[in-house]
Image (cartoon, coloured by chain):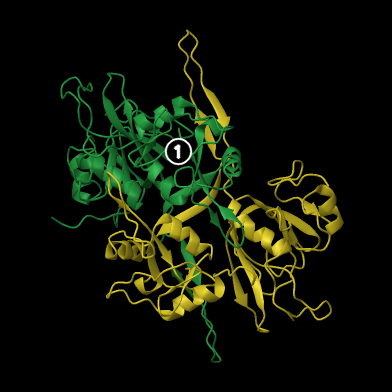
Chain colours: A green, B yellow
Amino acid sequence: MPERIFGHIPGFPVGSWFESGAELAAAGLHRPLVAGISGTEADEADSIVLSGGYEDDQDLGDEILYTGQGGRDQNTGKQVAHQKLNRGNLALAKSKLKGLPVRVICGSAHKSNNSPSTGYRYDGLYRVEDFWQEKGRAGYYVWRYRLVKFFENEIFTSSKVTDDLASYSISYRQETNILRIVRDTNQARRIKELYDYCCQVCSTRFEGAVGPYAEAAHIRPLGIPHNGCDSVDNLLCLCPNHHVLFDYGAFSVADNLSLIGIEGVLTVIAEHKIHPDNLRYHREHYYLKQGEL
Amino acid sequence: MPERIFGHIPGFPVGSWFESGAELAAAGLHRPLVAGISGTEADEADSIVLSGGYEDDQDLGDEILYTGQGGRDQNTGKQVAHQKLNRGNLALAKSKLKGLPVRVICGSAHKSNNSPSTGYRYDGLYRVEDFWQEKGRAGYYVWRYRLVKFFENEIFTSSKVTDDLASYSISYRQETNILRIVRDTNQARRIKELYDYCCQVCSTRFEGAVGPYAEAAHIRPLGIPHNGCDSVDNLLCLCPNHHVLFDYGAFSVADNLSLIGIEGVLTVIAEHKIHPDNLRYHREHYYLKQGEL
């Protein structure tokens, strides 16, 4: 089996059109003939196809909301079982951890003004910024992913000046990709002030020579489709480690503020009222319990 | 003293021109009449002016390299003392920790093809991505900053559908800003594999349901003016907490691999040869020893 390629496939720039899935596979753009996600449990995903399979798939330009595979009735197309976080679904989830680019191919069956009228079009590289589970209309859980345009090939220009008479510069392309973006908002800054930059899980406080550092996590994320609010009742002040663990569903918080998945209880000061709906949202959509995926 | 404003000043869009420093101050764009940085030890910096003061200041479009203030002879303009990390210099350093936008004003004296021929021009918002200390030509230390274009006002569209007959959507602007970007490279991925995602400082290993997570730090950063290489002899595998602490100069590593600023010794496997020049670069440019700033 030839090694999988992450990133663009030489010879097929963004916008390339393909008549069929077989052509896509032959070109190396998307190797599975049926599955929407290319990837196994051992690896990250190298490509996905938007092909109208799930009505909740959304194309927002630089952002895509995508649904995992599995659990559908072959004939009716209806969801008849929970999707598992295995195979391609797990591969696409691993992509969030690894930050490697995913080739996105848009098929004509994808319900969007942007879709090609026939065949498939290569739309470029995206990165998996987030994933979570959601209960679909039929009451079964599906896996959902947010992909954002991939920032690639940041050019770093290097200048070398030698001591001899001829000084020279070298420009070279250093490929970097974004693994993770930590964001802030007005209320995020407020929660950090409230807790004086102490982590609500482990009480760690980073005080450098320049000042303190902490991160803030929106319990129910902002934006479509989560629609969380930027307010302190939806925020936690965390150290970078616990921020990562929270975002990746390694632990969650019960209504009584005990921690789920790790030992301990959340430190919460009197003025900080966390809305239980937000905690529940995180438990239901993000908490990844081993063995129950 | 009126409260300082971070971000754009209403009424003065990007490109606004001002005849003098007094006009800048009156408009609220940059309040100090002499100092290049607006900010004190208690706050982050809200604005800076590029005015040709330091020959190392560079305007790379979306990136700016800027030099701190202080230690210069009034008459000759030469550096005659070390710059301290206090006052405006400290304010601009705090901006890295807080992620708040800095207004950048370009003056005619700034040596760049991009400068206005006279007066001052407001060039928009930037964020302080990094700062370090550097020995200038005269042998004195100056503080240096890398500012990058500020990504602001990410629009989050929220959809709310009510149960009554008239369903409706709400779009609102949710202001977020980037606090920190964690990047990866080919070799960064390699160092993580080498250490099986274990932090070289504290041995923490995050293993989630989906897979392991760790971050990699280039000891001598990539890009101008550091010119570090993307190679394992210039990389450390770290947990998010120690990655932040390393980037913010809270600790460094001695040639014998003992840790400076925190307890312990770096875990290094036999195959991983770290180049001592890179360690020295970090110590000399990034390590922030309390009381010696």
Residue name at image x 65 percent, y 84 percent: B139
Residue B266 visible somewhere in the drawing: yes
Q: Toward the viewer: A49 or B250? A: B250
Binning the other alpha carbons within 10 Å of mark 1 as few (below 14), some (14 to 19) or many (20 upward) gives some
Relative image position of residue A21 (x, y in whole percent): 20, 40
Residue A37 visible somewhere in the drawing: no
Q: Toward the viewer: A71 or A284? A: A284
Relative image position of residue B215 (x, y in whole percent): 39, 58
Query: In the figure, B263 relative to A32: above or below?
Result: below
Identity of the residue furthest to the top in this view: B165
Residue hosting label 1 = A266
Relative image position of residue A56 (x, y in whole percent): 34, 27
Q: Quadrant of the C terminus of chain B?
A: bottom right
Q: Toward the viewer: A153 or A119? A: A153
Which quadrant holds residue B59?
bottom right
Chain identifier of the residue bearing label 1 in the image: A
Which quadrant holds residue B173?
top right
Relative image position of residue B261 (x, y in whole percent): 51, 69
